[in-house]
Amino acid sequence: MPLVQLIIALIVVGLVAWLLRVYLPMSGGIRTIVDVVLMLIVVGMALWLINTYVPMAGSIKAILNIVVVVATCVGVLRVFGLWNQVVRGWRNLTTRYFHAEDHASTPSPKAPPVV
């Protein structure tokens, strides 16, 4: 019975998306938000379907869930144009950390050689 409900829900989501595109004029920002919400609904339903009906080990299921959540987060960030800022911030953070580590591990020129 839940499988029938899932199919009906997917059909309803498809119809709502089609009706919104055809009959409701929306600005770009509102349309983007609606598209993201519909995408999240479909991804959630697909993940639920896989978790419920595909037999697999618990560890593989956990890894699959993590991958889908991370991919969905990246997709949402890319849709809203925030992904490049996240990548830039990560590069700044790791560059500072690794440069600080490099400077801390190199001996100063005034230090006597270790024999």
Image (cartoon, grey):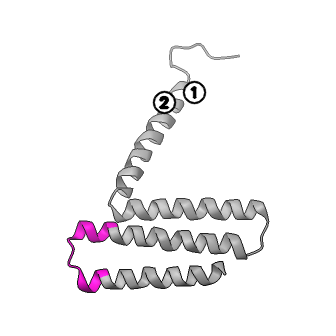
User: In the figure, residue 95 lies in which quadrant?
Assistant: top left
Q: Amino acid at mark 1?
A: Ser
Q: Could you tell me which residue is drawn at 32 percent across and 84 percent down?
A: 19
User: In the figure, residue 112 lies in which quadrant?
Assistant: top right
The answer to which of 92 and 43 lies nearer the viewer is 43
Label 1 sits on residue: 105
Q: Could you tell me which residue is drawn at 51 percent across and 14 percent down?
A: 110
Q: Residues within 10 Å of mark 1 (few under 14, many from 20)?
A: few
Label 2 sits on residue: 100
Mark 2 touching mark 1, by CB under 8 A?
A: no
Left or right relative to 6: residue 80: left
Q: Give, as a single range, the part of the protein colored magenta.
A: 20-33
Principal secondary structure, stretch drawn in magenta: helix
Q: Could you tell me which residue is drawn at 29 percent across and 82 percent down?
A: 21
Q: Secondary structure at mark 1?
A: helix
Quarter of the rendering occupied by the N terminus: bottom right
Left or right relative to 30: residue 112: right
Label 2, label 1: how far apart the Cα atoms are: 9 Å
Q: Amino acid at mark 2?
A: Ala
Q: Where 2 falls versus 36 (above or below)?
A: below
User: In the figure, residue 5 lies in which quadrant?
Assistant: bottom right
Q: Could you tell me which residue is drawn at 46 percent across and 61 percent down?
A: 74
In primary-sequence order, the first of circles 2 and 1 is 2
Q: Where 26 falls versus 102 (above or below)?
A: below
* Percent position of residue 73, x then y: 47, 59
Q: Where 58 falls versus 113 (above or below)?
A: below
The answer to which of 92 and 5 lies nearer the viewer is 5
Q: Secondary structure at mark 2?
A: helix
The answer to which of 1 and 72 lies nearer the viewer is 1
